């Protein structure tokens, strides 16, 4: 996510943030096999989070489950970062304020919204709608004054045709209301806004520490929202089934920590064009797992709408990568 049902890492260090020689040296040190292992981890771990959320939602209230997920993942990651660095991360007041805003958009409104909606929306369908995040980011960029290329705008238009098809027709075929479908779309838009702001707000330079703090902040906010939404903390110990608890543990450890580590490593060792393929592989993995594990229906409308969105995201990512490469070549060395 961006992955969503997954942790978004817009503030993670990209290859462009480091000197070119250092990036080249790291990439040469990483073998193709290692890169593909890390990619598969990101594909599967983030693609399977939608399945994990759906299973967790069976007996664990959504805001409570999401809150515990990020509190556990954030605490483990922060402890690991502190032990590795030998000190607790230093964060300024401005950085902390930015972390709160980004965390609320990404983890509370974004992931929390998807977790709440998946009580009614099949995991594969939710993943296809969340795949529109790159399209929403493009909309936000355009509204902020950026002028994308024609190919990028064409991909954007095509992608929202797919979103509209899924919202208006895809959900109805599976007994899902338009309201619940729009809730997922709104969560994706919030995730996109949080991702876009992450590149423009003062955030900690240490991506691992920043993400750990984002998780903790998001977990606290979700834990506060939980009782306000009528959820009971006792549900976690008295009513949660074994499969829901296993799903919660999986989301915290693999969906957040393991996938995050693999993703940051990839950003430092692989071309961004290769890393960004997760944006359109994750929904395919989610749809396949939803059908195989949960028996979710894959209707013709779902296939067509999903294919349109995935294709549009691929077009947008490719066009933006070419634009970035052209801009890099045009810079004086």
Image (spheres, helix red, strand yellow):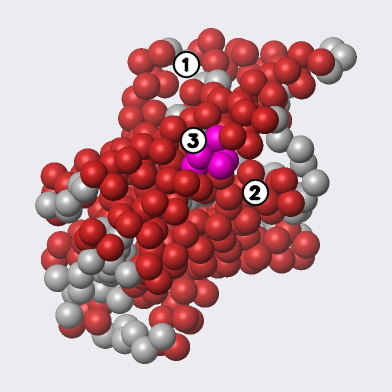
Up the image or down, 46 lies above or below 325; here it is: below
Q: Quickly name the residue at label 2.
A: 139
Residue 304 falls left or right of residue 288: right
Seen at 78% across and 62% down, the residue is: 94
Q: Is residue 156 magenta?
A: yes
Instruction: Give me the residue at 38% from left, 67% from top.
Output: 178
Label 3 and label 2: CA atoms lie apart by 13 Å
Q: Secondary structure at mark 3?
A: helix
Residue closer to the observer: 111 or 186: 186
Q: Is residue 19 above or below residue 65?
A: above
Q: Say which of marks 2 and 1 sits in front.
A: 2
Q: Residues within 10 Å of mark 3 (few under 14, many from 20)?
A: many
Residue ranking furthest to the right: 332
Q: Is residue 21 visible?
A: yes
**Residue 14 screen position, x and y as percent:** 63, 32
Residue for point 44% across, 54% down: 164
Q: Mark 3 or mark 2: which comes first in sequence? A: 2
Q: Gap in Å between the C-alphas at discs 3 and 1?
A: 30 Å
Distance (Cα) linking label 2 and label 1:
35 Å
> Which residue is label 3 attached to?
312
In the picture of the structure, the residue carrying the numbered disc 1 is 30
Quarter of the image for the C terminus: give it. top right
Residue range in magenta is: 155-159
């Amino acid at each position: 996510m961006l992955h969503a049902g997954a942790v978004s890492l817009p503030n993670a260090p990209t290859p462009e943030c480091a000197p070119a020689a250092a990036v080249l040296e790291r990439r040469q040190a990483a073998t193709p096999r290692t890169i593909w292992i890390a990619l598969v981890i990101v594909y599967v771990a983030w693609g399977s989070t939608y399945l994990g959320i759906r299973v967790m939602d069976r007996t664990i209230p959504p805001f409570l489950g999401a809150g515990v997920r990020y509190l556990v993942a954030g605490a483990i990651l922060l402890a690991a970062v502190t032990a590795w660095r030998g000190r607790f991360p230093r964060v300024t007041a401005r950085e902390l304020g930015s972390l709160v805003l980004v965390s609320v958009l990404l983890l509370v409104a974004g992931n929390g919204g998807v977790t709440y909606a998946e009580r009614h929306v099949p995991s594969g369908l939710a993943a296809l709608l969340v795949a529109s995040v790159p399209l929403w980011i493009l909309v936000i960029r355009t509204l902020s004054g950026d002028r994308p290329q024609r190919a990028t705008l064409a991909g954007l238009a095509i992608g929202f045709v797919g979103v509209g098809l899924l919202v208006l027709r895809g959900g109805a075929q599976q007994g899902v209301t338009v309201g619940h479908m729009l809730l997922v779309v709104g969560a994706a838009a919030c995730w996109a806004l949080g991702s876009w702001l992450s590149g423009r707000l003062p955030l900690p330079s240490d991506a691992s520490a920043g993400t750990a703090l984002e998780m903790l902040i998001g977990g606290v906010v979700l834990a506060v929202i939980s009782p306000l939404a009528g959820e009971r903390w006792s549900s976690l110990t008295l009513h949660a089934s074994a499969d829901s608890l296993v799903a919660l543990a999986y989301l915290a450890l693999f969906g957040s920590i393991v996938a995050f580590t693999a993703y940051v490593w990839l950003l430092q060792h692989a071309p961004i064009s290769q890393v960004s393929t997760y944006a359109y592989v994750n929904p395919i993995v989610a749809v396949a797992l939803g059908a195989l594990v949960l028996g979710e229906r894959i209707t013709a409308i779902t296939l067509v709408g999903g294919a349109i969105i995935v294709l549009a995201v691929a077009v947008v990512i490719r066009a933006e990568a070419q634009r970035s490469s052209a801009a890099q070549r045009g810079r004086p060395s």
